[in-house]
Amino acid sequence: MVRTRRFAVVGALVLLVGACASESGGGDTPAPGQGERGTVVSATPVAGMSVEETSAYLAEFDIPVRNGVDAYRVDYRTITAHGEPTTASGLVVLPRTDTARLRTVSFEHGTLVLKSDAPSVNNQGRPDQARTIMFAAAGYAAVAPDYLGLGDGPGSHPYTHAPTEVSASADLLFAAKSMAAQQYRELDRDVLVTGFSQGGHAAMAFGKALQADEVPGFGLAALAPVSGPYALRDVETPAGLDGRVAPGPAVFYFAYWLTAMNRIYHLYDNPAEAFQEPYADKIEGLFDGTRNELTIATSLPITPDLLLTPRFVALAKDPTGAALRAMTDSDGTCDWTPRVPVRLYAATADRNVPYANAEHCLRDLHSANATLQNLGELDHTASGRVAIPQVLAWFQQQSPPV
């Protein structure tokens, strides 16, 4: 039994910045039986609660609870950013109902640096596990990928790398399908997708892949990203340099993103090419998955101009070569025409992910199926806290649990 608790508010530095996915994200994803991806390696129970216990656990959300839940940390097979076999972990939560066919919600979490803060692991100081359970408490099957390099996943996290967020999300969906089948249940083909902050851009990327039939056996029912950085090149990066993103989150974002993308795209040979001293010597070690946001933030300068070398400030403003490839591969997930309802949520006082990201995305979607919900003068953290229960209510209208 999980104790009732209040969830700590995610700190201001748990920003989400990033971009959207390329057309190819998740395009070659095989369903289980067509290859190893999505195969369950292990499933560890992390919570089992009656309806009364679930109601107490989710008391902060002030939502009706329909049923109890069983939650599992699932390790499964997936691929790295370079297409090599690896494993990742994620949270799978099944409702305690008699329903044989379950509609599914995929919840994509926001920025994390500490491996043990991932949704499948942390049930105390972070809201992501509870948010995932919230959807299952309404009768849905709910899945939340930890992404690569977080939770039980080996290696480093490719921060806001949309292609691997899509592949990790798709392969966890296949793993959840196998787990449901062991209980003589099946997952509905069309998936409801949401996420906050980094998870907003991951949700947009995953929704795009689902509609494009890039996830065999699954499609998209509705999409509701919250406060996502959908326009990396046109909005988020310029805002990080000109002060629309608060200096602390901007420094954190540039440091995390550049070190992560260097492992994939080789942006620099030596950290001193990108980062000024004394930060260059230590910066890659800060993002090894063993340090929290506060530890990292206090090890970095207070403004981006004290962090980045002039060359990399110029590349941020006008990317070329490897920097342009890195941005392009994780940008543009709003460049599609949804055939299903899409509701964007964003707040005008957000100093981590400016509201202009959502406006830019809405223009790119260019569809009557897509709308933007203005959450008002909320900061970044508050936008997620307020919006996620609203997303649940909207999903229940669009595609209620069976």
Image (cartoon, rainbow, N blue to C red):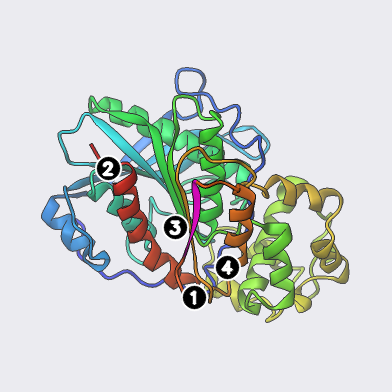
Q: Which residue is mark 1?
A: 379
Q: Is disc 4 surrounded by few (<14), some (14 to 19) or many (20+) residues within 10 Å? A: many
Q: Is residue 381 left or right of residue 314?
A: left
Question: Badges 3 and 1: C-beta atoms under 8 Å apart?
Answer: no
- Which residue range is magenta in the image? 369-373
Q: Quadrant of residue 351?
A: bottom right
As rendered, which of 313 and 359 lies closer to the eye? Answer: 359
Local crowd size for mark 1, using a 10 Å CA cut-off: few (<14), some (14–19), many (≥20): some
Q: Earlier in the sequence, mark 2 or mark 4?
A: 4
In the image, 285 versus 330, the foreground residue is 330
Pointer 3 or 2: first along the chain: 3
Q: Is residue 240 above or below residue 119?
A: below
Which residue is disc 4 drawn over? 355
Cα distance between the residues tagged 4 and 3: 30 Å
Residue 366 visible (yes or no) = yes
Q: Secondary structure at mark 3?
A: helix
Query: In the rendered image, which residue does mark 2 sit on?
Result: 400
- Secondary element under disc 4, as helix, strand or loop, is loop
The quarter holding residue 3 reads bottom left
Question: Which residue is most to the top?
Answer: 33
Q: Position of residue 96 (x, y in %)?
A: 17, 41
The amino acid marked with disc number 1 is: Asp
Q: Nearer the viewer, mark 4 or mark 3?
A: 4
- What residue appears at the point 76 percent right and 68 percent down from the top-left corner? 281
Q: CA distance from mark 2 to mark 1?
A: 30 Å
Residue bearing the label numbered 3 = 116
